[in-house]
Amino acid sequence: MNNTNNDNNLINLNVLSSILFIIGSFISLSITLDEKRNINNQKKIYSNEEALNISFYNRILILIAVLISLYVGFSNYKSEKNNTRAKYKSSLLLTTNILTVISALIILYVSYLNKQDQSLTVSDVENPLI
């Protein structure tokens, strides 16, 4: 019974992570479309400062989603029996999650630097999915 409850919690966390990724994607899309409007000499929706702030907080949202995925991956890895193919596959997925967290941290740092410099770059309008 306890294992079923744990699996249910992990699935709920996966759903939450997916929802955060979707929200982050929509936010990134709005910034990208706003930048496209700027390139086409149309009126922008966001000022550069607003776009930088939105982008920065969107990166934090994505980092949270990635950390949730890392937790789920670690929980799955721990639950597998040693010396099995499932444990090996879980270890590969866990390694991927760790690398994704590192990527998310680097992208957040770049976004922070751009926010400090008040400079909107391509990295601020690209898709937040790492």
Image (tube, rainbow, N blue to C red):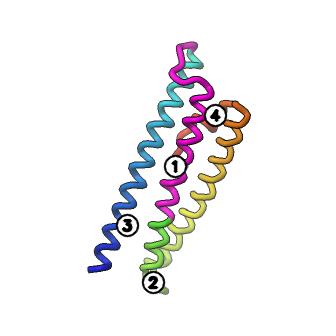
Q: CA distance from mark 4 to mark 3?
A: 35 Å
Which of the two discs, 3 and 2, sits closer to the camera?
A: 3
| Residue 50 found in image quarter | top right
Residue identifier under label 4: 122
Q: CA distance from mark 2 to mark 4?
A: 43 Å
Task: Name the mark on residue 62.
Answer: 1
Residue at figure coordinates x 30%, y 73% from the top left: 5
Q: Amino acid at mark 1?
A: Ile
Q: Amino acid at mark 2?
A: Thr
In contact (CB < 8 Å): disc 2 and disc 4: no
Q: Which range is magenta? A: 41-70
- In the figure, 43 relative to 123: above or below? above
Is the stretch drawn in magenta largely helix, strand or loop? helix
> In terms of depth relative to the viewer, which is nearer, 128 or 83?
128
Residue 20 percent across, percent down from the top left? 43, 49
Residue identifier under label 3: 10
Question: Which element type, helix, strand or loop, lies under badge 1?
Answer: helix
Task: Name the mark on residue 95.
Answer: none
Asked whether 111 falls inside the magenta stretch, the response is: no
Q: Does residue 97 appear to the left or right of 16 in the view shown?
A: right
Residue identifier under label 2: 84
Q: CA distance from mark 2 to mark 1?
A: 32 Å
Q: Earlier in the sequence, mark 4 or mark 1?
A: 1
Q: CA distance from mark 4 to mark 1?
A: 17 Å
